[in-house]
Amino acid sequence: MAVCEIWDVRGRLDSPLRYAANPDKTGNPRYTEAEWQSLSDVMKYATNGDKTEQQFFVSGINCDPSTAREEMQIVKRQFQDESEIVCYHGFQSFREGEVTPEQAHEIGVKLARKMWGDRFQVIVATHLNTGCLHNHFVLNSVSFTDGKHYHDNKANLKLLRQYSDELCREYALSVIENPVGKKKPYVICQAEKNGLPTRDSVARQAIDEAISKSYTMRDFAGQMKAMGYRVNFDPHHKYWTIQGEGWKRPKRLYRLGEDYTNERIVERISENSYAVRFSKFAPKHKPVRIYYVKGSLKHTKRIGGLRGLYLHYCYKLGFFRKGRKQNPARLHYLLKDDLLKMEYIAQETRLLCHHHIDTAEQLFSYQQSLQDEMQNLLAERQELHAPKNHPAAKERLSAIALRLREIRKEVRQCDNIAERSQSLKEKLSVIRADEAKQRREMNRDGYERRGGGTGRPHELGGS
């Protein structure tokens, strides 16, 4: 059984090439270090410049893996291509234990030749770093024969999967005969795998909470509206929908799972007892805790700037609320959009706090110091490459590689902070305005209830 997918890549051409030909993923684990050295003269796959003699499972179609990036760029310049899509990145994944690395790579090369070999340049790399062997394809977006673009559409994807299935049958591998269901986006799959909240999981949580507090469909609709969702529960409609603030289109509830179909929601609400209906008249009063602080907080320095901005945003997302679990369904819709980015925002906050960065100038200065250190390490690494097989040099090269990885990560974080900070300011401004409006409405409603009036003029002519 082989699963195929392909997507476009915008930006730099070397990134997907470097990822696909990563020696840590394509290296054959059956060979020893001594055998690596003996074969170093014949294995000249220099796609990323780091010990590429270990890349046994990297092949080029209509290009050489060691110069694939330059050859693809030549084709783009030849046909004056200025498209945002620089290449396409695809994969072919096999069931665990069905194929050997040699077979997987052979199938990948045959698939690439059959699908693109007559018009496009392709790099095929077989990754061995997971239980399921899989091929990566990096495809130039421009044809070297006529300069036309490859079209990533449903017809071509269907053809790719058809060719893959034919090759699997040829090698006596299993094939998915009748695929069903709609593929989830990769970002959503990874978030669910790591336990992070997604738009669907937040919607499920909101629906579950609304059902638990509802005795009728009217109660249910009111609870959903209170959480910021627009609803359509028309009994004459086949599919009920909800739409959160900021969503481009409504979401059909049945797509959230078996417990969220029209019939199942009505059934779940009907299972609630009368206690649900009258629970709001007997709210639970939590005991008020009083804390005494020794000393004075007058001279306490307030954290502002970028650190204060990120810390406040993390508080809004619920990072610092110990003892009280954050309810994503009750978050402001602008905060819900960043739930999938929680880990990135947390890492950027740690960077700002660890280095006490409050201003854009301090951020730029720190980023420049990282880039200077990177240049010095790259120069040192170039010098250490001269004396081969020296134990001390190898240890230092390993330390340099580790530090370069950390530096590149922090440089990217600095770029992200510079781009994200303005967006966070704007979101917090909108959130504060909405919260102030909500407080005014609650105060006005409370005042009218205490006054016992309707807020309208008397009907018998009085004012």
Image: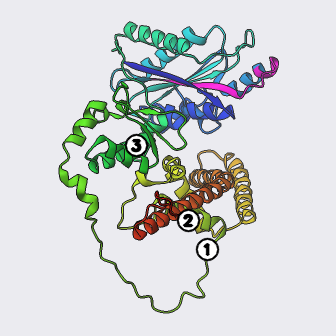
* Dots 1, 3 in contact, CB < 8 A: no
Measured from the top left, where is residue 344 in percent x and y? 54, 52
- Labelled disc at residue 303: 1
Measured from the top left, where is residue 205 in percent x and y? 35, 47
Is residue 280 positioned above or below 242 on the image? below
Residue for badge 3:
203
User: Looking at this view, is 231 or 113 the one in front?
Assistant: 231
What range of the chain is rendered magenta? 76-92
* Tag count: 3
Query: Residue at image x 25%, y 46%?
Result: 215
Measure the C-alpha gap from mark 3 to mark 2.
Answer: 26 Å
Q: Tell me the SS state at disc 1.
A: loop
User: Looking at this view, is 305 or 186 the one in front?
Assistant: 305
Q: Is residue 59 visible?
A: yes
Quarter of the figure with residue 96: top left
* Dots 1, 2 in contact, CB < 8 A: yes
Residue for badge 2:
311
Measure the C-alpha gap from mark 1 to mark 2.
Answer: 9 Å
Give the mark toward the camera: 1 or 3. 3
Q: Tell me the SS state at disc 2.
A: helix
Give the mark toward the camera: 3 or 2. 3
First in residue order: circle 1 vs circle 3 = 3
